[in-house]
Image: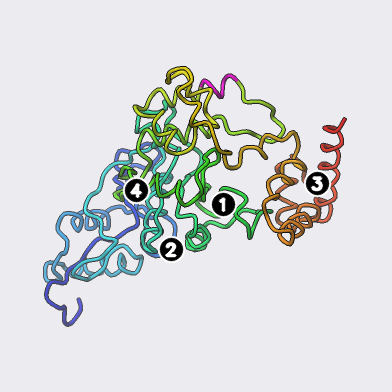
C-alpha cells in the first residue's frame, strides 16, 4: 500500500470498455468480466478473485486504500499495471457500470467502445454508422456486420487512423493515399479480426464533406456499447445513409438492381422524416426513384439538383474510366502521380490487388504485370 495517499484518492476501475460475460455464449464457464485495458493491448478476461474485486470497484470506487486487504492490494497492483485500475480521485476512463453484451459478438462491441474512447481522448468527433446500430434503431432486421464503420471529422481522418495503429490495426494498401478522392480509409486487424472503416464522407450526398458531417453530428443519438457511450446518426439520417449505401454504384456492375432499390425503400420506410432528411442532406439526386414512393408526384423535382459525390465515377463500366473520372478534379501533378501509381503500384497495393482478383502471385513485380494486363484487357473489352 502506498505510504501516503492524498485525501480523496482511492482505487478506481478504468477501461476502454467492459462487459459482463458470465452467461454469454462462446465463453468458458469461469469467464466473468471481459475488459479492454487503457493501455494498448488486446481484451483481457478477468476470472476469480480479480473479477470479483474489479466488480466491487465498479460499485464502490473510489475505494479507500485502508479498505483493501494485503491480498487485494496485490491484485490491484497487477490490475494497475494492466491499465485496469488507478489510485486517484477520478479518471476519464472510469467505468461506473457493468452490463452483458448488447451485440452477439462481445469483441465486436469492445471495438466500438475502443474507437469511441480513442477518438474522444483526442477530441475527434465521430459518429458510428451502419452495422448493428441499424437494427437497434429498428431500421433493419439483420443484427451483425463484419466490420465497424464510423464517420469522423473529415479533417482528422489520418489522425484517428494513426491513433488506432498501436491498438492492433494497420492501414490497408491504398492507391489513393495522400488524396481525399476515396471516401474511406480501411484498417485491417492484426489481432482483433474486425476491420474498421473510417469515413471522411458518405457517397451519394451533394453537400461538401464538412457540411455533411456537421449536419449528421448535430442530432446524433447515443448508444451504450461495453459501458461506453457512442454516437450514431438519428434514425431518419441513418435510414438515408443506409439507403445510399444499398444503391451505391459498383464499377462495372451496371444500373442498380431492383433488389437494391427495394432494400433502400425498406430502410426509408422505417424512419419517420426520411424524405425531409434526404432533402436536407442533399441525397435526393441519388435516391429520387426510391424516395418517390413516399412523396407526392413531382414534389422532389426541386431537390434533384447537384451532383452526388463519388457517384458518377462509380457508374463507369471499367476501372480505367472510373479512376480517370475520379481524379479529374485533381491538379495535374496529383493526377500524374496517381496514374503512375495505378500503372505500376507499390508492393502492398499490387499484392492486395492480386489477392482481391483471386490471384496468388509469387512476387509484387509479377502482381504488377498481372494487374496491368487485367486493366488493359477490361478496358479493351469495354471499347468493343
Spatial CA distance of label 4 from label 2 is 20 Å
Instruction: Tell me where residue 237 appears, x and y as whole percent.
Output: 40, 36
Q: Which residue is mark 4?
A: 230
Mark 3: which secondary structure? helix
Q: Which residue is mark 3?
A: 371
Mark 1: which secondary structure? strand
Q: Which residue is mark 1?
A: 185
Spatial CA distance of label 2 from label 1 is 21 Å
Q: Give the number of the disc on residue 374.
A: none
Residue under the point 43% across and 44% down: 108
The stretch in magenta equals 258-262
In the image, 277 versus 128, the foreground residue is 277
Q: Earlier in the sequence, mark 2 or mark 1?
A: 2
Q: Are marks 3 and 2 in contact (CB under 8 Å)?
A: no
Q: Which residue is mark 2?
A: 40
On the rendered structure, is 327 left or right of 34?
A: right
Q: Quadrant of the N terminus?
A: bottom left
On the rendered structure, is 303 left or right of 31?
A: right
Residue under the point 76% across and 37% down: 318
Q: Residues within 10 Å of mark 3 (few under 14, many from 20)?
A: many
In the image, 122 versus 295, the foreground residue is 295
Q: Quadrant of the C terminus?
A: top right
- Image quarter of residue 71: bottom left
Amino acid at each position: 500500500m502506498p505510504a501516503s495517499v492524498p485525501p480523496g484518492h482511492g482505487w478506481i476501475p478504468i477501461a476502454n470498455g467492459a462487459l459482463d460475460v458470465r452467461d454469454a455464449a462462446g465463453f468458458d464457464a469461469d469467464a466473468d468480466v471481459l475488459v479492454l485495458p487503457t493501455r494498448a493491448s488486446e481484451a483481457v478476461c478477468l476470472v476469480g478473485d480479480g473479477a470479483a474485486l474489479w466488480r466491487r470497484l465498479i460499485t464502490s470506487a473510489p475505494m479507500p486504500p485502508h479498505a483493501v486487504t494485503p491480498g487485494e492490494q496485490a491484485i490491484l497492483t497487477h490490475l494497475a499495471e494492466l491499465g485496469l485500475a488507478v489510485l486517484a480521485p477520478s479518471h476519464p476512463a472510469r467505468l461506473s457500470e457493468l452490463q452483458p453484451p448488447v451485440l452477439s459478438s462481445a469483441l465486436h462491441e469492445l471495438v466500438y467502445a475502443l474507437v469511441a474512447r480513442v477518438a474522444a481522448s483526442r477530441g475527434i468527433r465521430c459518429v458510428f454508422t451502419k452495422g448493428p446500430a441499424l437494427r437497434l434503431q429498428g431500421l433493419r432486421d439483420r443484427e451483425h456486420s463484419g466490420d465497424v464503420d464510423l464517420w469522423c471529422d473529415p479533417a482528422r481522418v489520418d489522425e484517428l487512423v494513426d491513433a488506432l495503429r498501436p491498438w492492433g490495426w494497420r492501414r490497408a494498401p491504398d492507391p489513393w493515399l495522400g488524396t481525399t478522392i476515396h471516401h474511406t480509409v480501411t484498417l485491417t486487424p492484426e489481432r482483433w479480426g474486425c476491420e474498421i472503416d473510417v469515413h471522411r464522407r458518405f457517397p451519394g450526398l451533394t453537400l461538401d464533406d464538412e457540411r455533411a458531417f456537421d449536419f449528421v453530428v448535430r442530432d446524433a443519438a447515443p448508444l451504450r456499447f461495453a459501458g461506453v457511450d457512442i454516437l450514431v446518426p438519428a434514425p431518419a439520417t441513418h435510414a438515408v445513409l443506409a439507403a445510399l449505401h444499398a444503391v451505391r454504384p459498383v464499377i462495372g456492375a451496371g444500373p442498380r438492381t431492383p433488389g437494391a432499390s427495394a432494400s433502400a425503400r425498406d430502410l426509408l420506410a422505417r424512419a419517420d422524416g426520411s424524405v425531409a432528411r434526404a432533402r436536407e442532406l442533399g441525397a435526393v439526386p441519388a435516391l429520387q426513384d426510391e424516395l418517390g414512393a413516399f412523396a407526392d408526384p413531382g414534389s422532389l423535382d426541386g431537390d434533384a439538383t447537384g451532383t452526388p459525390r463519388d457517384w458518377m465515377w462509380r457508374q463507369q463500366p471499367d476501372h480505367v474510366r472510373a479512376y480517370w473520372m475520379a481524379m479529374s478534379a485533381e491538379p495535374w501533378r496529383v493526377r500524374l502521380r496517381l496514374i503512375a501509381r495505378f500503372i505500376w503500384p507499390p508492393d502492398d497495393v499490387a499484392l492486395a490487388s492480386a489477392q482481391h482478383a483471386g490471384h496468388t502471385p509469387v512476387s509484387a513485380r509479377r502482381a504488377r504485370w498481372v494487374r496491368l494486363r487485367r486493366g488493359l484487357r477490361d478496358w479493351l473489352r469495354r471499347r468493343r
